[in-house]
Image: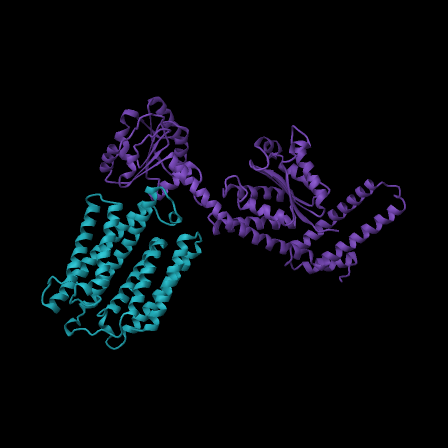
Chain colours: A purple, B cyan
């Protein structure tokens, strides 16, 4: 009888387009039900389902790799409402053993994410683990595997720069603002125009604490509308220059063909502000602000290309850091596999497995030689599979218990009881 | 002065410098604690070295000699930095202070030996007061220059839109500018008191409060510069790059004269390199 292995079957943003991922995705409300169905598959002893917008994966522990892979494939295919099995053909990947451990650690550490280093995936992983734990489909192996993956993720995050540096335009803008200003909650923002990008940046700034927001637009009604949305103050377009002294951050997002702010205007504003720093963010398709503004002391001007450039740099930085992260993952995979191996060397467990396997084999051979003599090769195989599945299911609970509490004081008691009950003799 | 202790001190300052550099470029907060601890260890060794020196016969002569002066100055600078670290958690600043402290303590045991002889007239209680105040003022200016240098680096990055690993560790420009102000406000009165006590001593020793000694002239220049800077900050609303640059210039004058000036423009003032 083979030992339990960790298996992963799934698809992600790399292997499947969003339409496919959507169809396979698991509904949060029916998750417990799905987990139980997964757990009831004959070859699956432990199982966790992971379903985010970028990936759907089943993580399982099984003693019968090939059978389990087939069952999980079918399990996922059944999930798809529209098409049958063929719909997933070519999209699924399968990992077992160390490859599976490595894959899960990489997912947790956000090395497998669409945006390298994004932090959400770890939270999602925890959520789905907890759901599986509550549904009772997690045993000693996956328990340890997931907890290990959480600490790998944490290690990667603290020891490498994989999560550092903003990689979207609006978060780069906020990052830069935080490098210029000590705090943002006492700063004023002026939003000029109603572009989508400006919206994003304004929202992001409000999320990090900016409270005073002025909004201006060529049509005043639109400015009022926007100001309502942001709980800001509308300012007439003709007047906006006058309010610039109160603005520490100025976000330009109009499609205006002419430049809205000249260097000379900003110079005057600065004087009135006693040289207090200003940060101009030009998100217009054509320049909203005079580029010479950046030449003034205490003034910083970034246009959309600059912001994208910084995001690009940060992304590059992240992929450089990814190499370090991969090394950490590799190290941890080794550690985990050693632990897994050590589990199976507990003599009582080995003896128990052997004993039961001997019984299974003996009875099977006896029957196949007598009452079941006429069976075809295929039927024999099915019988073989069925009996192995039965045996591993029966043994799973007691063995899991033994593995779960290696330092438990009751362990000696359990082992003694097991030896007596099953009449085991250790070699 | 106990050279072994000073060597140990210099070694710890060097280790602290290394750790601060790693802190700057890596993202592990462990190095923040390590750096500060190493610097503190160096500081304790330094304190012991100065203590041993003080209780030697004639050791009272605080800073009559260049090496003694250098040692005392770097000790005070590290002390001020450690206090600032306690209050503001400004670990990055340590990466400017630690190498400076290392070079100074290296210079202290590399240049000459023995205890400086003090002229009889200088054995006044005002001497240690003068030395301490003057060095304290200059220590605070060293910190002001540290944050100013950081400001310039950070500003350069932001203006040129090229980000480096430093940006993750540096405080915001606004914070750095505020620290510049805090340090100027503390440093200027200390320096003023240092100059006043200095001229009292000059009256005792040289017979005049002011005698156009190169040492006095450089002190006056820095005093005027920092005074003007502070005034411009408070009344004129100066801030940012200009202030940072001038702060560094002022400190360069002080340090430059302290280290090399004595050999170019000889002064009767003790404790500069002659």
Q: Residue at x 69, y 58 (%)?
A: A345
Given residues A336 and A162, the one toward you in this image is: A162
Q: Position of residue A360 (x, y in %)?
A: 81, 50
User: Within the image, what quadrant is residue B146 found in?
Assistant: bottom left
- Residue B217 vs residue B153: left or right? left
Q: How many marks?
A: 0
Q: Position of residue A356 (x, y in %)?
A: 78, 53
User: Within the image, what quadrant is residue A306 found in?
Assistant: top left
User: Within the image, what quadrant is residue A46 found in?
Assistant: top right
Given residues A110 and A427, the one toward you in this image is: A110
Q: Residue at x 26, y 66 (%)?
A: B70
- Residue B240 vs residue A367: left or right? left
In the rendered image of this protein, does residue A371 appear above or below residue B75? above
Residue A83 seen in the figure: yes
Q: Residue furthest bottom?
A: B57
Q: Residue at x 25, y 77 (%)?
A: B57
In the rendered image of this protein, does residue A209 appear above or below residue A320? above
Q: Residue at x 31, y 26 (%)?
A: A258
Q: Residue furthest left?
A: B207
In the rendered image of this protein, does residue A127 appear above or below residue B24? above
Q: Position of residue B84 (x, y in %)?
A: 32, 56
Q: Where's the C terminus of chain A, which quadrant?
A: bottom right
Q: Residue furthest right?
A: A370
Residue A207 seen in the figure: no
Q: Position of residue B93 (x, y in %)?
A: 33, 54
């Amino acid at each position: 009888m083979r030992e339990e292995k960790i298996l992963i079957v799934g698809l992600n943003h790399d292997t499947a387009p969003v339409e496919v991922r959507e169809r396979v995705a698991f509904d949060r409300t029916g998750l417990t039900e799905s987990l139980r169905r997964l757990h009831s598959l004959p070859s699956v002893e432990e199982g966790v389902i992971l379903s985010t917008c970028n990936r759907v994966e089943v993580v399982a522990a099984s003693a019968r790799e090939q059978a389990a892979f087939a069952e999980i494939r079918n399990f996922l295919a059944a999930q798809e409402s529209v098409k049958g099995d063929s719909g997933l053909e070519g999209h699924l990947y399968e990992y077992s053993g160390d490859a599976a451990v490595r894959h899960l650690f990489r997912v947790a550490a956000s090395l497998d994410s669409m945006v390298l280093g994004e932090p959400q995936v770890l939270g999602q992983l925890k959520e789905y683990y907890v759901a599986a734990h509550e549904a009772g489909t997690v045993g000693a192996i996956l328990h340890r595997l997931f907890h290990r993956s959480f600490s790998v993720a944490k290690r990667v995050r603290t020891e490498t720069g994989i999560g550092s540096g903003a990689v979207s335009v609006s978060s780069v803008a906020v990052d830069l603002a935080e490098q210029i200003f000590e705090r943002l909650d006492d700063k004023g923002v002026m939003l000029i125009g109603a572009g989508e990008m400006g919206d994003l940046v304004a929202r992001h700034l409000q999320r990090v604490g900016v409270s005073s927001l002025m909004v201006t637009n060529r049509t005043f009604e639109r400015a009022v509308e926007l100001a309502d949305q942001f709980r800001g103050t509308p300012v007439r377009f003709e007047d906006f220059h006058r309010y610039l002294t109160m603005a520490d951050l100025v976000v330009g997002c109009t499609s205006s063909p002419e430049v809205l702010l000249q260097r000379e205007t900003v110079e005057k504003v600065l004087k009135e502000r006693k040289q207090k720093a200003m940060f101009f963010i030009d998100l217009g398709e054509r320049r909203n602000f005079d580029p010479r503004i950046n030449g003034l002391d205490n003034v910083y001007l970034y246009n959309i290309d600059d912001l994208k450039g910084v995001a690009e740099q940060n992304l590059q930085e992240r992929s450089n850091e990814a190499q370090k992260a991969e090394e950490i993952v590799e190290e941890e995979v080794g550690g985990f596999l050693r632990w897994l191996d050590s589990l199976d060397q507990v003599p009582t467990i080995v003896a128990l497995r052997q004993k039961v396997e001997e019984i299974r084999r003996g009875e099977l051979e006896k029957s196949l030689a007598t009452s079941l003599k006429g069976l075809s090769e295929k039927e024999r195989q099915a019988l073989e599979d069925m009996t192995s599945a039965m045996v591993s299911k029966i043994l799973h609970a007691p063995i899991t218990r033994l593995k779960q509490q290696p330092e438990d004081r009751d362990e000696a008691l359990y082992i003694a009881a097991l030896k007596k009950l099953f009449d085991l003799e250790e070699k | 002065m106990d050279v072994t202790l000073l060597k140990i001190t210099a070694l710890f300052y060097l280790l602290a410098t290394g750790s601060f550099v790693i802190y700057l470029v890596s993202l592990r907060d462990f190095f923040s604690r390590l750096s500060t601890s190493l610097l503190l260890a160096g500081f304790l060794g330094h304190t012991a070295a100065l203590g041993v020196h003080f209780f030697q016969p004639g050791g009272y002569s605080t800073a009559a000699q260049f090496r003694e002066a250098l040692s005392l100055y770097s000790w005070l600078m590290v002390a001020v930095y450690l206090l600032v670290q306690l209050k503001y958690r400004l670990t990055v600043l340590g990466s400017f202070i630690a190498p400076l402290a290392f070079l100074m303590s290296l210079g202290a045991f590399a240049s000459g030996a023995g205890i400086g002889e003090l002229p009889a007239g200088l054995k006044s209680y005002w001497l240690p007061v003068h030395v301490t105040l003057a060095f304290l003022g200059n220590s605070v200016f060293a910190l002001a220059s540290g944050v100013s240098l950081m400001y310039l680096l950070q500003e350069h990055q932001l203006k040129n839109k090229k980000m480096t690993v430093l940006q993750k560790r540096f405080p915001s420009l606004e914070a750095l500018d505020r620290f510049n102000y805090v340090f100027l406000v503390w440093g200027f009165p200390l320096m003023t008191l240092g100059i006043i006590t200095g001229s009292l001593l000059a009256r005792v020793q040289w017979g005049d409060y002011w005698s156009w000694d190169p040492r006095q002239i450089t002190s006056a220049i820095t005093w005027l510069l920092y005074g003007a800077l502070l005034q411009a900050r408070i009344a004129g609303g100066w801030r940012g790059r200009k202030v940072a640059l001038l702060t560094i210039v002022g400190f360069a004058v002080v340090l430059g004269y302290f280290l090399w000036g004595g050999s170019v423009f000889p002064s009767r003032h003790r404790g500069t390199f002659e």
